[in-house]
Image (cartoon, rainbow, N blue to C red):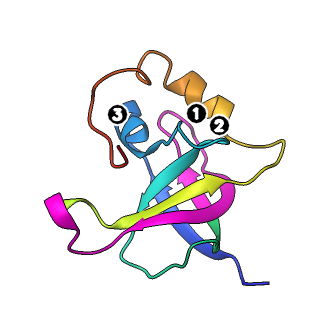
Amino acid sequence: MSETKTLTLNLKDKQALHAAYMPFLKRGGLFIPTSRSFLPGDRIEVNLQLPEEPDPIKVYGTMVWRTPVGAQGRKTPGIGVHFAEDEDSPRYFIEDLLAGLLNTDKPTHTL
């Protein structure tokens, strides 16, 4: 088994959370800006600071895709992390925070 790699994501407001959140993944996920190298399937631990929350939470998942440095369209380099399949998935908490924003046309880092 590969070691778990750790990243930090500090989201200052709901718009930043909306831009990073990936509701189209089965269990939800996040785009994490990084220039570090990861492989599909790498286990990732994210120290996630959500807007209006006093303390960061730990989120676990696997890397499912990468936007490389220098990607077409000046996209932010980073990785997509699919939340781990467990009862503590932050998906519902994040979707509650984003109520009213999920179905907007605002651009995101993902689609």
Mark 3, Cα crowd under 10 Å, few <14 / some 14-19 / many 20+, is some
Mark 2, Cα crowd under 10 Å, few <14 / some 14-19 / many 20+, is some
Residue placed under numbered mark 1 in the picture: 94
The reply to whether discs 1 and 2 touch (Cβ–Cβ < 8 Å) is yes
| Residue 74, image x, y percentages | 16, 61
Amino acid type of the residue tagged 2 in the rendering: Arg
| Residue 23, image x, y percentages | 53, 36
Residue placed under numbered mark 2 in the picture: 91
Residue that appears at 18% across and 64% down: 72
The image quarter in which residue 14 lies: top left
Which quadrant holds the N terminus? bottom right
> Camera-side residue: 39 or 43?
39
Q: Nearer the viewer, mark 2 or mark 3?
A: 2
Which label was assigned to residue 56?
none
Identify the magenta region: 46-73
Residue placed under numbered mark 3 in the picture: 15
The image quarter in which residue 81 lies: bottom right
Amino acid type of the residue tagged 1 in the rendering: Ile
The kind of secondary structure element at disc 1 is: helix
Height in image: 82 above or below 50? below
The kind of secondary structure element at disc 3 is: helix
